[in-house]
Image: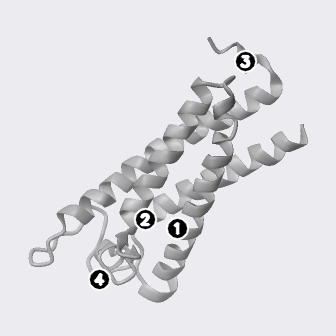
Amino acid sequence: MFEFLTERKVHNEANILLFTIMLSFVGMLFAGFLTFEEITWDPLHPTHPPFCVVGGLWDCGEVIHGPYNNIFGIPLAYLGLLGFVLIFLFSIIRLVHWGRDYTKNFFLFVLFVALVGAVLSWYLTYLELFVIHAICPYCFTSFLLITVILAVDLYGFLRGSRE
């Protein structure tokens, strides 16, 4: 079924896709938790997620429910979950349906989604550090995951274009 993995160039992209699938799955878990936090948030009875200290450096409430929480009215947690789901699904489709023409550009689509997600995540991390002065460990983990996904996929794309 996976005979194509024996070719060197294919083997490299397949490894990158497998790594991307694993990281995006972990990202879906973190973004899913943040989405759950967003959905269940009650400003009259505020609670804070585990590992978040109210008023300290690790203040998730200040980050998740603050004024920088959304873009065009869409909560960033929803966008993060959508991004990780798209990366996960398109990486799996590309890996499983390798030889089919319609999947050739899926790797580029994954790279594009990772780039958009990374730019949004970098901006949010900048806001956390220099404007909000509070860090959400879940958001920061998401930042690390999407940055690594982007770096690995960009490496694979650049290496693949040279071969």
Q: Residue furthest bottom?
A: 131
At 32% from the left and 80% from the top, the residue drawn is 62
Residue 55 is tagged as: 4
Of the 4 image quadrants, the one containing the C terminus is top right
Disc 2 marks which amino acid? Cys
**Coordinates of residue 48 in the picture (x, y in percent):** 22, 69
Residue 35, image quadrant? bottom left
Whether residue 49 can be seen here:
no
* Image marks 1 and 4: residues in contact by CB distance under 8 Å: no
In this rendering, the label closer to the viewer, 2 or 4: 2
At 76% from the left and 17% from the top, the residue drawn is 6
Number of dots carrying numbers? 4
Residue 4 is tagged as: 3
Counting residues from the start of the chain, the first of labels 3 and 1 encountered is 3
| C-alpha span from label 3 to label 1 | 35 Å
> Would you call the spot at circle 1 few (<14 residues within 10 Å), some (14-19), or many (20 or more)?
many
In this rendering, the label closer to the viewer, 3 or 2: 3
| Horizontal side, residue 147 vs residue 121: left or right | right
Residue 76 is tagged as: none
At 47% from the left and 58% from the top, the residue drawn is 142
Counting residues from the start of the chain, the first of labels 4 and 3 encountered is 3
Nearer the observer, 58 or 148? 148
* Image marks 2 and 1: residues in contact by CB distance under 8 Å: yes
12 to 4, vertically: above or below: below
Disc 4 marks which amino acid? Gly
In this rendering, the label closer to the viewer, 3 or 1: 3
Look at mark 1 in the image and give the residue it sits on. Answer: 121
* Image marks 4 and 3: residues in contact by CB distance under 8 Å: no
| C-alpha span from label 2 to label 4 | 17 Å
**Coordinates of residue 141 in the picture (x, y in percent):** 47, 59
Look at mark 2 in the image and give the residue it sits on. Answer: 139
